[in-house]
Amino acid sequence: MSRILYLHQHFSTPEGGTATRSYAQARALARAGHEVTVATGRFAGAETGLSGPFRFGRREGMVDGFRVVEWDIPYEGGMGLGARGLAFARYALRALPPALSGHDLVIASSTPLSVAVPALLARRLRGTPFLFEMRDPWPELPRALGLRNRPILAAMEALAGAACREASGVVALSEGMAELARARGAKRVEVIGQGCDLDLFGPHISAWRPEEAASHEALAVYAGAHGTANGLGLLLEAAARLRSAGEARIRIVLVGQGPAKAALMREALRRGLRNVSFVPPLPKRELAGLLAGSQIGLLCLAPVEEFAEWTAPNKLMDFLAAGLPVVSNLPGAAARLLEEGACGVTVQPRDAEALAAALVRLAARPGERITMGRAARELAQRRLDRRFLAARFVAAAETALGAPPRPFEATA
């Protein structure tokens, strides 16, 4: 049995409303016989599985076979740059003592990139190997989104380079991220993408719909962050075109929270977009019911060229697992996946007219929509089952530990 410290500032169980990748992987590591501790902060929308009071800024307990340590370090997407940086720094400082306390392996899961600091120091001061999980490309992504502070970008570049070079292994969520890791000198890189939770999402889940949704309306659901990077103004433009065309068969549903949500709601009200519903963040289990009662998944990101190969949207996996056809404005890897699976339509990143037309087509052709939904679920089962991907992550962690490879098997 190896002692593994898993550093992820934004950890959540399926009871929360955010991504659960680290939960699935920590559980798989524990079921493979390792003693796992997940160290996390207090992320808005997350549920860590702990409910007791914080004492001296922390609480801890066992969750599904592994230990969770949660520090009272609040973070949410609507924070300003300074507040976010402070939260990242506080987490890195709190993570340093456990990283130096004699674990056999440290897993540093970025975002944020600062999570690599305690892992690097444990490597340099104690020789502890670490696995660097690259969920987002830093500093490339913030640079693409408009960050121009040269000292900050230079510091990010230095930290990202050190993390890739000194890690015993790098797990990247996309081929584009893997290429960046290799360019920085990573010794061993494995691509393990986002996976589908086939038990949590799917046609077997009891369905529900928002109260304002009419029975004749096809629900097209976006579920995720409402920020600059998501470009959700495009969905409002598509809704406006649907309304102007007198199209009453489609309702766009935006689920989630973020710094752009208030402005989006004001804009929808100003334009009289009664075919748009805003829903607060939902726990994953409630979201699964909404997707079961919906007809189309919406994947939307801002028209940033780098997103094409560098991003790995978790929401796409939820749509596929739920058996929904997907309408997307994201080119690159996501578009190739939808085309390969014959389970979605991709439009140009800025083309609201084409997006509206794709929604009309799917609403008007229920047979085609159902066929594409079945293909989405089949693709999820064939290639994207999270249990198999979690087993690959266990193998990557054990390789970083220097252990011989074990027979490959999925964990339930």
Image: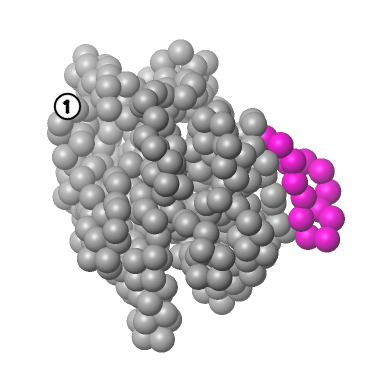
> What's the residue type where badge 1 is placed?
Ala
Q: Is residue 27 above or below residue 126?
A: above
Q: Is residue 159 above or below residue 191?
A: below
Residue 353 horizontal/vertical position (percent): 19, 46
The one of 326 and 159 positioned closer to us in this rendering: 159
Residue 77 horizontal/vertical position (percent): 53, 59
Would you say the magenta stretch is mainly helix, strand or loop? loop
Q: Which residues are magenta?
A: 49-63
Q: Is residue 171 above or below residue 288?
A: below
Residue 126 horizontal/vertical position (percent): 56, 65
Q: Is residue 220 visible?
A: no
Query: Within 10 Å of the Cα at label 1, are there few (<14), some (14-19), or many (20+) other Cα atoms?
Result: some
Reading the image, the residue beneath label 1 is 342
The one of 209 and 390 positioned closer to us in this rendering: 390
The one of 320 and 349 positioned closer to us in this rendering: 320
Locate residue 177 relative to residue 151 in the image: left or right. Answer: left
Q: Is residue 59 magenta?
A: yes
Locate residue 227 relative to residue 177 in the image: left or right. Answer: right
The residue located at (62%, 39%) in the rendering is: 35
The residue located at (39%, 71%) in the rendering is: 162
Locate residue 120 relative to residue 149 in the image: left or right. Answer: right
Question: How many marks are shown on the rendered structure?
Answer: 1
Q: Is residue 400 above or below residue 370?
A: below
Residue 99 horizontal/vertical position (percent): 61, 60
